[in-house]
Image (spheres, helix red, strand yellow):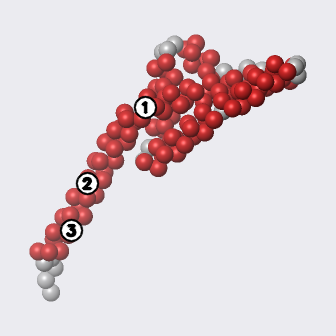
């Protein structure tokens, strides 16, 4: 009994190994390209959503302190701005479907915050929850 593969079978085996090699090498390149293509848009949406959440939190606190008409209007306006978070979430889901992993998305968020000012004060201001 011969263990030699027919010529056609050898081509299929080679094709499978080449495909696996391309997949292994290609995945990091694909993710790197996605990060570079979408970094600016993702960073902008990150900033808008962070700002909207912070403004809504502050507006809610003001309404708790004093339920006047101006404070209630500001709260309503801040809630409408939360639509930016929907856009941010949609882009995050899209990037995940395209192959980015949670750590890569986190890196993109950090880069966007860092790119805005590069100062620790800005990072603290954006992420600080005030009571």
- Which of disc 1 and disc 3 is earlier in sequence? 3
Q: Residue at x 20, y 64 (%)?
A: 15
Viewport quadrant of the N terminus: bottom left
Viewport quadrant of the C terminus: top right
Mark 2 lies on residue: 21
The CA distance from mark 1 to mark 2 is: 28 Å
Task: Give the image location of residue 119, x and y in percent.
Answer: 51, 13
Q: Residues within 10 Å of mark 3 (few under 14, many from 20)?
A: few
Q: Residue at x 46, y 43 (%)?
A: 95
Q: Residues within 10 Å of mark 1 (few under 14, many from 20)?
A: some
Q: Residue at x 58, y 12 (%)?
A: 121
Instruction: Determine whether label 3 and label 1 are within 8 Å by CB.
Output: no
Judged left or right of residue 5, residue 87 is right
Task: Say above or below: 73 vs 35.
Answer: above
Give residue 123's quadrant in the image: top right
Task: Give the image location of residue 48, x and y in percent.
Answer: 58, 27
- Looking at the image, which is closer to me, 115 or 79? 79
**Going by the picture, which residue comes out furthest to the left?**
7
Is residue 4 shown to the viewer in this render?
no
- Looking at the image, which is closer to me, 36 or 28? 36
Give residue 54's quadrant in the image: top right
> For the residue labelled by badge 1, is the local secondary structure a helix, a strand or a loop?
helix
Q: Report the disc number at residue 13.
A: 3
Mark 1 lies on residue: 39
Instruction: Determine whether label 1 and label 2 are within 8 Å by CB.
Output: no
């Amino acid at each position: 009994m011969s263990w030699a593969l027919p010529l056609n079978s050898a081509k299929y085996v080679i094709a499978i190994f080449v495909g696996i090699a391309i997949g292994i090498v290609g995945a990091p390149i694909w993710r790197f390209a996605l990060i570079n293509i979408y970094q600016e848009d993702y960073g902008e949406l990150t900033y808008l959503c962070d700002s909207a959440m912070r403004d809504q939190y502050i507006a809610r606190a003001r309404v708790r302190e004093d339920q006047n008409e101006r404070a209630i209007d500001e709260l309503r306006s801040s809630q409408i701005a939360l639509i930016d978070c929907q856009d941010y979430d949609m882009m995050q889901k899209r990037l995940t479907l395209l192959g980015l992993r949670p750590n890569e998305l986190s890196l993109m968020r950090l880069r966007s915050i860092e790119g805005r000012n590069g100062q620790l004060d800005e990072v603290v201001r954006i992420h600080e929850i005030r009571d």
